């Protein structure tokens, strides 16, 4: 990863308050194409807020977020929604699969929202579920799955559209350490195989060790110089 290439996604001097709490106070981060970047730091340091601002889920109060040529922090909701459907995938701590839908339909949904036919979307969902080792659970609903199986389904849902960036917020936070290691290994290898960059928020050094690079937040801004993990 050359430091001279333009970042794919760049947050600069972000400021964001939640009510009276200053969650970000001048946080900056750059994500390059194809890299896995860990954002670490203690509880409350602003990691999730930074991820949400960089994913266009939250609008910062100050600073900027650039994704390729686009200013995410000022672009329209419609443009942001379209981008989140096509270019971004998200995985959260508790998979957040839709409980009423089967695993296949959960994974097929982002494709269908992007205009793919149901039949084609379900076929591609099935391939991704197989790739993540949960093909045999395709017809199960989330409530019938183990935490690790549900999280693999969430990974499949995040990657099925071929995103350029996967945002993963404590993706192993609800899993035991073995399941967590498996999910991290699968996330990183699937992202590398498809060329997606990963912005990984974690407070766990073992999870951060899967990243190419780490930035550490403290009190809403970068605490130390960026460096290799
Ligand atoms: N929706 C909200 N409403 C009010 N305060 C919030 C909200 N979300 C976050 N905060 C506060 O903003 C600060 C930063 O929170 P954030 O979740 O970004 O930190 P974090 O580093 O991801 O923490 P954790 O590791 O505990 O998830 C914290 O003080 C938190 O309590």
Image (spheres, rainbow, N blue to C red):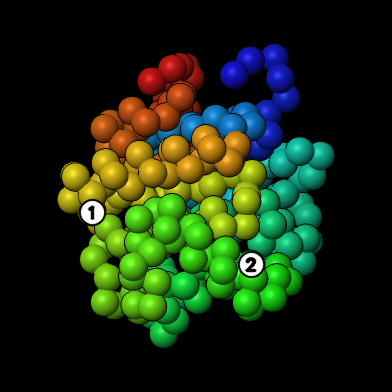
Question: For this rendering, which residue is in front, 23 or 208?
Answer: 208
Residue 133 in the image, given as x and y percentages of width and height: 35, 55
Question: For this rendering, which residue is in front, 38 or 89?
Answer: 89
> How many C-alpha atoms fall within 10 Å of the one at disc 1: few (<14), some, or many (≥20)?
some
- Cβ at disc 1 under 8 Å from ligand 1: no
Q: Is residue 20 visible?
A: no
Residue 155 in the image, given as x and y percentages of width and height: 44, 55
Figure check: 47 above or below 20: above
Figure check: 64 above or below 58: above
Secondary structure of the residue carrying numbered label 2: helix
Residue 9 in the image, given as x and y percentages of width and height: 66, 37
- Residue indicated by mark 1: 175
The residues tagged by marks 2 and 1 sit, at their Cα atoms, a distance apart of: 27 Å
Residue 106 in the image, given as x and y percentages of width and height: 48, 72
Question: For this rendering, which residue is in front, 122 or 153?
Answer: 122
Residue placed at 54% from the left, 53% from the top? 159
Query: Of the residues under marks 2 and 1, which one precedes in the sequence?
Result: 2
The quadrant of the rendering that contains the N terminus is top right
Secondary structure of the residue carrying numbered label 1: loop
Question: For this rendering, which residue is in front, 225 or 61?
Answer: 225
The quadrant of the rendering that contains the C terminus is top left
Camera-side mark, 2 or 1: 2
Residue placed at 27% from the left, 37% from the top? 204
> How many C-alpha atoms fall within 10 Å of the one at disc 2: few (<14), some, or many (≥20)?
many
Residue 229 is labelled as: none
- Residue indicated by mark 2: 111
Q: Is residue 132 visible?
A: yes
């Amino acid at each position: 990863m050359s430091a001279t290439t333009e970042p794919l996604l760049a947050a600069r001097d972000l400021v964001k308050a939640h009510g009276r709490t200053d969650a970000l106070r001048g946080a900056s981060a750059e994500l390059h194409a194809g890299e896995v970047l860990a954002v670490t730091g203690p509880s409350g340091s602003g990691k999730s807020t930074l991820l949400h601002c960089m994913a266009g889920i939250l609008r910062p109060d100050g600073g900027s977020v650039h994704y390729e040529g686009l200013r995410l922090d000022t672009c329209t909701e419609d443009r942001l929604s379209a981008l989140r459907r096509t270019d971004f995938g998200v995985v959260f701590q508790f998979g957040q699969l839709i409980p009423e839908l089967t695993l296949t339909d959960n994974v097929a949904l982002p494709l269908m929202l992007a205009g793919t036919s149901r039949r084609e979307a379900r076929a591609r969902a099935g391939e991704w579920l197989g790739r993540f080792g949960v093909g045999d659970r395709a017809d199960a609903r989330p409530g019938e799955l183990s935490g690790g199986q549900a999280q693999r389904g969430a990974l499949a849902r995040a990657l099925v559209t071929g995103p350029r960036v996967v945002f993963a917020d404590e993706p192993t936070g609800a899993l035991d350490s073995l399941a967590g290691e498996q999910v991290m290994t699968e996330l990183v290898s699937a992202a590398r195989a498809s060329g997606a960059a990963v912005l990984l928020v974690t407070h766990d050094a073992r999870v951060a060790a899967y990243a190419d690079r780490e930035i550490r937040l403290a009190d809403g801004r970068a605490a130390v110089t960026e460096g290799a993990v």
